[in-house]
Image (cartoon, rainbow, N blue to C red):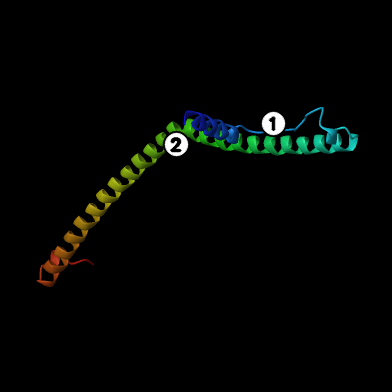
Amino acid sequence: MSLSRLAAALALAAAFVPAAALADDPNDPAMRDPKARARDAAIIRQLNRDQLAHVRQRDAEYAKGWQAYRDYPARQAEHRAALARHDRVRQQYDRDRASYEAKMREWRRAVELCRAGREEYCGE
């Protein structure tokens, strides 16, 4: 019973052990031909270029993110300043609007008094 378990375990282990790759194997008969080696070198060069382009693009994206992170305090300060400006403009608008409303109330009151016969409230 234990012998069969041992055999099963060895068979399972052998199934998961990767086979040795023949890439760049100097004893590989297919790589003895100079054209095959040149083709293999060209493929490897292209793979390296592709990987380099990928890494440069990834790093550029990372750099944008880090730059945004570094710029955040300044952008936040600009945003706060813009909010403060907006609040000042809004407060000035509210004051101007209140003044306008008060003048309109005075004018309407003067119109009422003028129509009621009080000539000192009538304009020229």
The correct choice, above or below, for 82 with respect to 107 in the image is above
Q: Earlier in the sequence, mark 2 or mark 1?
A: 1
The correct choice, above or below, for 94 with respect to 79 in the image is below
What residue appears at the point 55 percent right and 35 percent down from the top-left corner? Answer: 12
Q: Which mark is residue 75?
A: 2
Q: Secondary structure at mark 1?
A: loop
Which residue bears the numbered disc 1? 20
The location of residue 124, given as percent across then percent down, is: 23, 67
What residue appears at the point 81 percent right and 34 percent down from the top-left corner? Answer: 41
The location of residue 101, given as percent across then percent down, is: 21, 57
Between disc 2 and disc 1, the foreground one is 1
The location of residue 111, given as percent across then percent down, is: 16, 67
The correct choice, above or below, for 91 with respect to 5 in the image is below
The front one of 11 and 41 is 11
The front one of 1 and 104 is 1
Relative to 50, is 89 on the left or the right? left
Q: Secondary structure at mark 2?
A: helix
